[in-house]
């Protein structure tokens, strides 16, 4: 079914199915270690979440679901754990495309975090299953419009919209284009930009394509940690390269993408203070990113 195909493709933690058996074999020992660590944890959901993720990668969905339940018993207010449980239950189901427990998990996730992308995806899929195809497409387009450029789920989300549109004779191409045109810039993007032109620092670079691909396979919490680490490194480098306008714009953009407008504003003021002659240019760039 389309939902099942979409769920596999949408998985934020996806690895190719061809690689799954190999990953499972290589991870057998680590799963045992992860289970031992989880069993020893009574107040930290992290070890149970890590175990669940390892089972998920090995396509042992029933075991993954049980581990997510144990994690949620410790941290019941973590939206990402609820949506991860929901997706795992979808993939574990042999008959129902969207089991009742999975649906309840997605609803709980959005009650805790209305922006949880995985829960939003599956709740839109519920509309499609209920034959509200237009409602599903509208919800998916809203998710696409609010997803950062290059989000791990972007390609599969677009493909789902296209498939449902085609199957139900609903025009979606122009709507997809509109949704994509107003999205936030990617946090993790190669290169140092073009604002500074010849003045750009040759040492200020984003991650390689391989690093971007690797980041797309991380858990959301680890993606956030990686992004924050990169931003901290950039901020530290700008202390020694205060005239690098590209770097300041990248820092402002990254702070906004991380949902830190106050820090983005502070970065703008620091940039202007270090480069008063480029104040207008910096403020224009910042304004385009939503910083005033």
Image (cartoon, grey):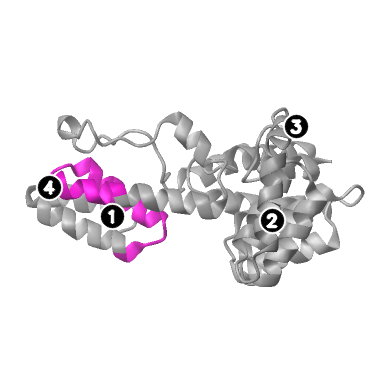
Nearer the observer: mark 4 or 3; the answer is 3
**At which x and y percent is residue 71?**
68, 64
- The secondary structure type at the circle numbered 4 is helix
> Quick one: 203 or 186, which is closer to the camera?
203
Looking at marks 1 and 3 on the same chain, the residue that comes earlier in the sequence is marked by: 3
Marks 1/4: CA–CA distance: 14 Å
Marks 2/1: CA–CA distance: 50 Å
Nearer the observer: mark 1 or 4; the answer is 4
The residue that label 2 is drawn on is 36
The residue that label 3 is drawn on is 21
Marks 4/3: CA–CA distance: 54 Å
As drawn, the residue found furthest toward the left would be 277
**Contact check, label 1 and label 3, Cβ < 8 Å:** no
Looking at marks 2 and 1 on the same chain, the residue that comes earlier in the sequence is marked by: 2
The residue that label 4 is drawn on is 278
Q: What is the crowding at mark 2: few (fewer than 14 residues within 10 Å), some, or many (at least 20)?
A: some
Please name the residue shown 74% across and 41% down the image. Answer: 58
């Amino acid at each position: 079914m389309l939902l099942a195909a979409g769920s596999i493709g949408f998985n934020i933690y996806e690895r190719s199915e061809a690689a799954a058996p190999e990953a499972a074999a290589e991870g057998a020992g680590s799963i045992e270690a992860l289970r031992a660590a989880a069993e020893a944890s009574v107040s930290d959901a992290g070890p149970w979440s890590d175990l669940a993720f390892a089972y998920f990668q090995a396509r042992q969905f029933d075991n993954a679901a049980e581990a997510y339940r144990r994690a949620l018993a410790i941290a019941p207010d973590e939206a990402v754990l609820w949506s991860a449980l929901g997706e795992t239950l979808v993939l574990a189901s042999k008959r129902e495309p969207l089991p009742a427990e999975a649906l309840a998990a997605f609803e709980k996730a959005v009650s805790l975090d209305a922006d949880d992308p995985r829960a939003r995806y599956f709740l839109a899929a519920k509309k499609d299953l209920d034959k509200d195809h237009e409602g599903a497409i509208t919800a998916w387009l809203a998710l696409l419009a609010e997803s950062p450029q290059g989000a791990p789920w972007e390609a599969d989300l677009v493909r789902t919209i296209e498939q449902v549109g085609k199957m139900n004779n609903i025009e979606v191409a122009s709507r997809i284009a509109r949704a994509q045109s107003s999205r936030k810039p990617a946090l993790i993007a190669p290169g140092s930009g073009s604002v500074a032109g010849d003045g750009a620092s040759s040492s200020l670079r984003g991650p390689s394509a391989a690093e971007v691909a690797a980041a797309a396979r991380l858990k959301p919490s680890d993606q956030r940690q990686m992004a924050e680490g990169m931003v901290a490194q950039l901020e530290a480098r700008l202390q020694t390269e205060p005239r690098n306008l590209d770097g300041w714009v990248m820092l402002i953009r990254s702070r906004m993408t991380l949902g830190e407008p106050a820090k983005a504003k502070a970065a703008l003021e620091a940039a202007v203070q270090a480069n008063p002659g480029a104040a207008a240019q910096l403020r224009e760039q910042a304004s385009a990113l939503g910083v005033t």
